[in-house]
Image: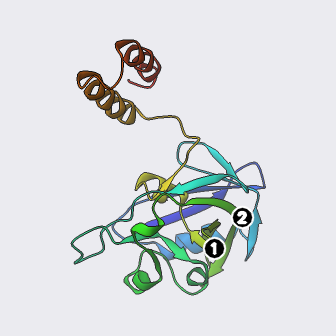
């Protein structure tokens, strides 16, 4: 996995784009990283959908993932202890013990308190620090965390799949006579806006 980071025309916005390849071109990453100062900070971060997130925005931790050999989802693979980011490159086996563990964190509300880039061996490594359950945690790619649903943006519009799933649940409630036909029809009309 290779990660590229760049700031867009807005100097105070960090735009992170994640892409996958068979190898990592260290020379290209170093050349690309020259545009950043070490420990540069930003007020905003832009995700893969073009949504802008700012310091003070709130997220929720979703579900942890499986680590190799585990029988169940055990760790947030893209969420780290803050200190881990200064010494390691993410997505390597060495950081498994530094990744945020388990289910007791699921659903916890987190607030962005810092957005920045630090350099390690000449390569820019972004970090987003969040305050969560009285602790500071960090992520390196908001795209990765949103795509894996380790991080949930409560302000994001509902996806088509989420709307269909919710509609199916409402249909079950209607069939069990837990809600009225009018309640079902009202919510179906709202959910239909998100179904493509």
Placement of the N terminus among the 4 image quadrants: bottom left
Q: Position of residue 88 (x, y in %)?
A: 52, 84
Residue 5 sits in quarter: bottom right
Residue 13 image-quadrant placement: bottom right
> What residue did someone put label 2 on?
113
Q: Residue 128: x and y, percent?
A: 63, 65
Q: Earlier in the sequence, mark 2 or mark 1?
A: 2
**Of 28 and 87, which appears nearest the observer?**
87
Q: Nearer the viewer, residue 85 or 134?
A: 134
Quarter of image, res 73 = bottom left
Residue that appears at 40% across and 59% down:
63
Residue 62 lies, in percent from the top left, at: 45, 57
Residue drawn at the location 50% of the way across and 55% of the way down: 143
Question: Residue 24: where, in percent of width, then height?
Answer: 43, 72
- Measure the C-alpha gap from mark 2 to mark 1: 9 Å
Q: Nearer the viewer, residue 144 or 191?
A: 191
**SS at badge 1:** strand
Position above or below: 173 against 181: below
Q: Residue at x 55, y 67 (%)?
A: 139
Left or right: 157 as drawn, with respect to 23: right
Q: Is the residue marked by circle 2 packed among few (<14), some (14-19), or many (20+) residues within 10 Å?
A: some
Residue at (32% x, 34% y) in the render? 165
Image quarter of the C terminus: top left
Residue nearest the viewer, comparing 80 with 110: 110
Q: Which mark is residue 136?
A: 1
Callouts 2 and 1 close, C-beta under 8 Å: yes
Q: In the drawing, what numbered circle is on residue 4?
A: none
Q: Is residue 88 left or right of residue 95?
A: right
């Amino acid at each position: 996995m290779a990660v590229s980071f760049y700031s867009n025309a807005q100097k105070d916005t960090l735009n992170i784009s994640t892409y996958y390849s068979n190898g990592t071109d260290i020379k290209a990453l170093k050349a690309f990283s020259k545009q950043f100062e070490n420990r540069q900070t930003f007020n905003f971060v832009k995700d893969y959908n073009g949504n802008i997130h700012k310091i003070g925005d709130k997220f929720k931790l979703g579900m942890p993932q499986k680590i190799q050999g585990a029988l169940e989802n055990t760790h947030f693979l893209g969420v780290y202890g803050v200190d881990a980011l200064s010494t390691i490159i993410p997505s390597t086996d060495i950081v498994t013990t530094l990744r945020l563990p388990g289910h007791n964190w699921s659903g916890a509300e987190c607030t962005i308190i810092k957005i920045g880039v630090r350099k390690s061996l000449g390569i820019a490594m972004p970090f987003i620090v969040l305050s969560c359950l009285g602790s500071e945690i960090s992520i390196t790619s908001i795209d990765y965390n949103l795509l894996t649903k380790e991080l949930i943006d409560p302000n994001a519009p509902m996806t088509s799949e989420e709307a269909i799933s919710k509609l199916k649940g409402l249909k079950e409630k209607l069939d069990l006579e837990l809600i009225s036909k009018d309640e079902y029809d009202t919510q179906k009309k709202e959910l239909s806006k998100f179904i493509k």
